[in-house]
Image: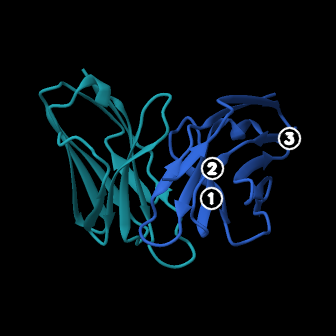
Amino acid sequence: ETGVTQTPRHLVMGMTNKKSLKCEQHLGHNAMYWYKQSAKKPLELMFVYSLEERVENNSVPSRFSPECPNSSHLFLHLHTLQPEDSALYLCASSQLEGTNTEAFFGQGTRLTVV
Amino acid sequence: AQTVTQSQPEMSVQEAETVTLSCTYDTSESNYYLFWYKQPPSRQMILVIRQEAYKQQNATENRFSVNFQKAAKSFSLKISDSQLGDTAMYFCAFMKHGGYNKLIFGAGTRLAVHP
Protein backbone atom coordinates (compact mmCIF):
# COMPACT_ATOMS: atom_id res chain seq x y z
CA GLU A 1 0.00 0.00 0.00
CA THR A 2 1.67 3.16 -1.18
CA GLY A 3 1.56 6.29 0.96
CA VAL A 4 0.11 8.23 -1.97
CA THR A 5 -2.88 6.71 -3.76
CA GLN A 6 -4.26 7.91 -7.08
CA THR A 7 -7.54 6.94 -8.70
CA PRO A 8 -8.40 5.99 -11.31
CA ARG A 9 -5.28 4.29 -12.69
CA HIS A 10 -6.53 4.64 -16.26
CA LEU A 11 -9.04 7.04 -17.77
CA VAL A 12 -10.31 7.46 -21.31
CA MET A 13 -12.47 10.48 -21.91
CA GLY A 14 -13.96 12.38 -24.80
CA MET A 15 -13.18 16.00 -25.41
CA THR A 16 -16.59 17.09 -24.15
CA ASN A 17 -16.54 15.03 -20.96
CA LYS A 18 -15.96 16.20 -17.40
CA LYS A 19 -13.96 13.94 -15.10
CA SER A 20 -11.87 14.22 -11.96
CA LEU A 21 -8.62 12.67 -10.82
CA LYS A 22 -8.23 11.94 -7.14
CA CYS A 23 -5.13 11.79 -4.96
CA GLU A 24 -4.95 10.82 -1.30
CA GLN A 25 -1.87 10.81 0.90
CA HIS A 26 -1.54 8.91 4.16
CA LEU A 27 1.83 10.34 5.19
CA GLY A 28 0.78 13.38 7.20
CA HIS A 29 2.38 15.72 4.67
CA ASN A 30 1.36 19.36 4.31
CA ALA A 31 2.13 19.98 0.63
CA MET A 32 0.69 18.28 -2.45
CA TYR A 33 1.53 18.53 -6.14
CA TRP A 34 0.24 17.67 -9.58
CA TYR A 35 2.77 16.78 -12.28
CA LYS A 36 2.18 15.98 -15.94
CA GLN A 37 4.39 13.40 -17.65
CA SER A 38 4.17 13.38 -21.44
CA ALA A 39 6.11 11.12 -23.76
CA LYS A 40 9.67 12.29 -24.40
CA LYS A 41 9.32 15.36 -22.13
CA PRO A 42 10.50 16.02 -18.59
CA LEU A 43 7.92 15.96 -15.84
CA GLU A 44 6.15 19.29 -15.68
CA LEU A 45 4.91 20.76 -12.43
CA MET A 46 1.30 21.89 -12.83
CA PHE A 47 0.08 22.92 -9.38
CA VAL A 48 1.38 23.13 -5.83
CA TYR A 49 -0.73 23.28 -2.68
CA SER A 50 1.00 24.27 0.52
CA LEU A 51 -1.06 24.00 3.70
CA GLU A 52 -4.15 23.63 1.48
CA GLU A 53 -3.47 26.90 -0.31
CA ARG A 54 -2.51 26.99 -3.96
CA VAL A 55 0.94 28.52 -4.20
CA GLU A 56 1.87 27.79 -7.77
CA ASN A 57 0.04 27.48 -11.05
CA ASN A 58 2.48 26.95 -13.87
CA SER A 59 0.52 28.55 -16.72
CA VAL A 60 -1.80 25.58 -16.86
CA PRO A 61 -4.88 25.99 -19.10
CA SER A 62 -8.14 26.61 -17.29
CA ARG A 63 -9.54 23.30 -18.53
CA PHE A 64 -7.52 21.85 -15.62
CA SER A 65 -8.93 22.89 -12.26
CA PRO A 66 -7.31 21.70 -9.01
CA GLU A 67 -8.98 21.40 -5.65
CA CYS A 68 -7.45 20.70 -2.25
CA PRO A 69 -10.24 20.33 0.34
CA ASN A 70 -7.83 19.24 3.10
CA SER A 71 -4.19 18.33 3.56
CA SER A 72 -4.79 14.67 2.67
CA HIS A 73 -6.76 15.04 -0.54
CA LEU A 74 -6.08 16.62 -3.90
CA PHE A 75 -8.27 16.60 -6.99
CA LEU A 76 -7.75 17.59 -10.60
CA HIS A 77 -11.00 18.41 -12.35
CA LEU A 78 -10.90 18.04 -16.12
CA HIS A 79 -13.26 19.49 -18.72
CA THR A 80 -13.18 20.01 -22.49
CA LEU A 81 -9.70 18.53 -22.78
CA GLN A 82 -7.69 18.24 -25.98
CA PRO A 83 -5.94 15.15 -27.38
CA GLU A 84 -2.55 16.71 -26.49
CA ASP A 85 -3.58 16.54 -22.84
CA SER A 86 -3.19 12.76 -22.99
CA ALA A 87 -0.42 11.95 -20.51
CA LEU A 88 0.41 10.37 -17.19
CA TYR A 89 -0.69 12.61 -14.33
CA LEU A 90 1.29 12.13 -11.15
CA CYS A 91 0.39 13.33 -7.69
CA ALA A 92 3.03 13.84 -5.02
CA SER A 93 3.17 14.97 -1.41
CA SER A 94 5.92 16.20 0.87
CA GLN A 95 6.59 17.75 4.24
CA LEU A 96 7.58 21.39 4.05
CA GLU A 97 9.80 21.46 7.12
CA GLY A 98 12.41 19.23 8.68
CA THR A 99 15.11 17.07 7.19
CA ASN A 100 12.96 14.66 5.19
CA THR A 101 11.47 16.93 2.58
CA GLU A 102 11.56 14.61 -0.40
CA ALA A 103 8.43 14.09 -2.45
CA PHE A 104 6.53 10.81 -2.44
CA PHE A 105 4.62 9.97 -5.60
CA GLY A 106 1.51 8.03 -6.44
CA GLN A 107 1.33 5.56 -9.32
CA GLY A 108 -0.31 8.06 -11.60
CA THR A 109 -3.40 8.21 -13.75
CA ARG A 110 -2.89 7.38 -17.40
CA LEU A 111 -5.24 9.76 -19.22
CA THR A 112 -6.23 9.32 -22.85
CA VAL A 113 -8.34 12.01 -24.51
CA VAL A 114 -10.17 10.84 -27.62
CA ALA B 1 15.70 29.45 -13.56
CA GLN B 2 17.04 26.03 -12.78
CA THR B 3 17.54 23.37 -15.46
CA VAL B 4 18.46 19.69 -15.26
CA THR B 5 20.03 17.83 -18.18
CA GLN B 6 20.36 14.10 -18.64
CA SER B 7 22.32 13.49 -21.81
CA GLN B 8 21.82 9.73 -22.02
CA PRO B 9 18.33 8.82 -23.26
CA GLU B 10 19.07 5.09 -22.98
CA MET B 11 21.65 2.88 -21.30
CA SER B 12 22.08 -0.86 -20.98
CA VAL B 13 24.16 -3.01 -18.69
CA GLN B 14 24.71 -6.67 -17.99
CA GLU B 15 23.51 -8.12 -14.74
CA ALA B 16 26.08 -7.80 -11.91
CA GLU B 17 28.02 -5.06 -13.72
CA THR B 18 28.29 -1.37 -12.84
CA VAL B 19 26.68 1.49 -14.73
CA THR B 20 26.86 5.26 -14.32
CA LEU B 21 24.07 7.64 -15.28
CA SER B 22 24.96 11.28 -15.91
CA CYS B 23 23.20 14.44 -14.80
CA THR B 24 24.17 18.09 -14.97
CA TYR B 25 22.24 21.04 -13.68
CA ASP B 26 22.33 24.79 -13.76
CA THR B 27 21.44 27.05 -10.86
CA SER B 28 22.52 30.22 -9.13
CA GLU B 29 21.34 28.89 -5.76
CA SER B 30 23.92 27.91 -3.15
CA ASN B 31 21.71 25.69 -1.02
CA TYR B 32 19.68 22.97 -2.68
CA TYR B 33 18.98 19.26 -2.91
CA LEU B 34 19.55 16.79 -5.71
CA PHE B 35 17.70 13.53 -6.16
CA TRP B 36 17.63 10.44 -8.30
CA TYR B 37 14.20 8.91 -8.78
CA LYS B 38 13.44 5.55 -10.38
CA GLN B 39 10.27 4.90 -12.37
CA PRO B 40 9.72 1.20 -13.12
CA PRO B 41 6.97 -0.05 -15.46
CA SER B 42 4.55 0.21 -12.53
CA ARG B 43 4.92 4.00 -13.11
CA GLN B 44 5.42 4.96 -9.49
CA MET B 45 8.34 7.33 -8.94
CA ILE B 46 10.54 5.95 -6.20
CA LEU B 47 13.28 7.92 -4.49
CA VAL B 48 16.65 6.22 -4.95
CA ILE B 49 19.04 8.67 -3.33
CA ARG B 50 19.31 12.30 -2.24
CA GLN B 51 22.19 14.71 -1.78
CA GLU B 52 22.28 18.00 0.13
CA ALA B 53 24.42 20.54 -1.69
CA TYR B 54 26.12 21.72 1.50
CA LYS B 55 27.45 18.22 2.18
CA GLN B 56 30.71 17.40 0.46
CA GLN B 57 30.45 13.70 1.15
CA ASN B 58 28.78 11.74 -1.62
CA ALA B 59 25.56 10.00 -0.64
CA THR B 60 25.31 6.20 -0.78
CA GLU B 61 22.37 3.83 -0.43
CA ASN B 62 23.40 0.17 -0.65
CA ARG B 63 24.29 -0.46 -4.32
CA PHE B 64 23.56 3.15 -5.32
CA SER B 65 26.03 5.99 -4.93
CA VAL B 66 26.47 9.43 -6.39
CA ASN B 67 29.41 11.48 -7.58
CA PHE B 68 28.48 15.04 -6.66
CA GLN B 69 30.72 17.71 -8.17
CA LYS B 70 29.29 21.03 -6.99
CA ALA B 71 31.66 23.28 -8.89
CA ALA B 72 31.02 21.40 -12.11
CA LYS B 73 27.28 21.14 -11.32
CA SER B 74 27.40 17.44 -11.98
CA PHE B 75 25.48 14.70 -10.14
CA SER B 76 25.98 11.20 -11.55
CA LEU B 77 24.44 7.98 -10.24
CA LYS B 78 26.46 4.77 -10.02
CA ILE B 79 24.63 1.47 -9.75
CA SER B 80 26.85 -1.40 -8.65
CA ASP B 81 26.06 -5.09 -9.04
CA SER B 82 23.14 -4.27 -11.37
CA GLN B 83 20.04 -6.39 -10.96
CA LEU B 84 17.18 -7.13 -13.34
CA GLY B 85 14.88 -5.19 -11.02
CA ASP B 86 16.93 -2.05 -11.67
CA THR B 87 15.42 -1.85 -15.17
CA ALA B 88 13.51 1.45 -15.17
CA MET B 89 13.53 5.10 -16.13
CA TYR B 90 15.84 7.14 -13.93
CA PHE B 91 15.22 10.83 -13.35
CA CYS B 92 17.59 13.36 -11.89
CA ALA B 93 15.86 16.18 -10.03
CA PHE B 94 16.77 19.50 -8.40
CA MET B 95 15.03 21.21 -5.53
CA LYS B 96 15.82 24.62 -4.08
CA HIS B 97 16.12 24.73 -0.29
CA GLY B 98 13.30 26.40 1.58
CA GLY B 99 9.67 27.09 0.78
CA TYR B 100 7.54 24.47 -0.87
CA ASN B 101 9.41 21.62 -2.44
CA LYS B 102 9.26 22.21 -6.17
CA LEU B 103 11.17 19.57 -8.09
CA ILE B 104 12.79 20.28 -11.45
CA PHE B 105 13.29 17.06 -13.39
CA GLY B 106 15.59 16.01 -16.20
CA ALA B 107 14.24 14.17 -19.24
CA GLY B 108 15.24 10.79 -17.85
CA THR B 109 17.48 7.88 -18.80
CA ARG B 110 15.98 4.52 -19.67
CA LEU B 111 18.14 1.78 -18.15
CA ALA B 112 17.87 -1.82 -19.29
CA VAL B 113 19.60 -4.54 -17.28
CA HIS B 114 20.20 -7.72 -19.29
CA PRO B 115 20.77 -11.23 -17.91
Q: Residue at x 60, y 70 (%)?
A: B31
Check the image and tell me how it is coloured: by chain
Q: Chain of mark 2?
A: B
Q: Which residue is mark 2?
A: B25
Q: Chain of mark 3?
A: B
Give amino acid for label 1: Leu
Q: Chain of mark 1?
A: B
Position in image of residue B86 (x %, y %): 71, 40
Label pair 1/3, CB-CB below 8 angstroms: no
Horizontally, is A55 left or right of A94 in the view? Answer: left
* The quadrant where residue B94 appears: bottom right
Give amino acid for label 2: Tyr
For the C terminus of chain B, the image quarter is top right
Q: Which residue is mark 3?
A: B18
Q: Residue at x 24, y 20 (%)?
A: A114
> In the rendered view, would you say A20 is above or below B58?
above
- Judge if badges 1 and 3 mark residues of a common chain: yes
Q: In the image shown, does A64 or A93 lie closer to the viewer?
A: A64
Give amino acid for label 3: Thr
SS for callout 3? loop
Rendered blue, the chain in question is B
Rendered cyan, the chain in question is A
Marks 2 and 1, the one that precedes in the sequence: 2
For label 3, the crowd category at 10 Å Cα-Cα, with few meaning under 14, some 14 to 19 and many 20 or more, is: some
- Whether residue B8 can be seen here: yes
Position in image of residue A23 (x %, y %): 32, 53
Horizontally, is B92 left or right of A2 in the view? Answer: right
Q: CA distance from mark 3 to mark 2?
A: 23 Å
Label pair 2/1, CB-CB below 8 angstroms: yes
> In the rendered view, would you say B76 is above or below B33?
above
Q: Which mark is residue B34?
A: 1
Q: Residue at x 30, y 31 (%)?
A: A85
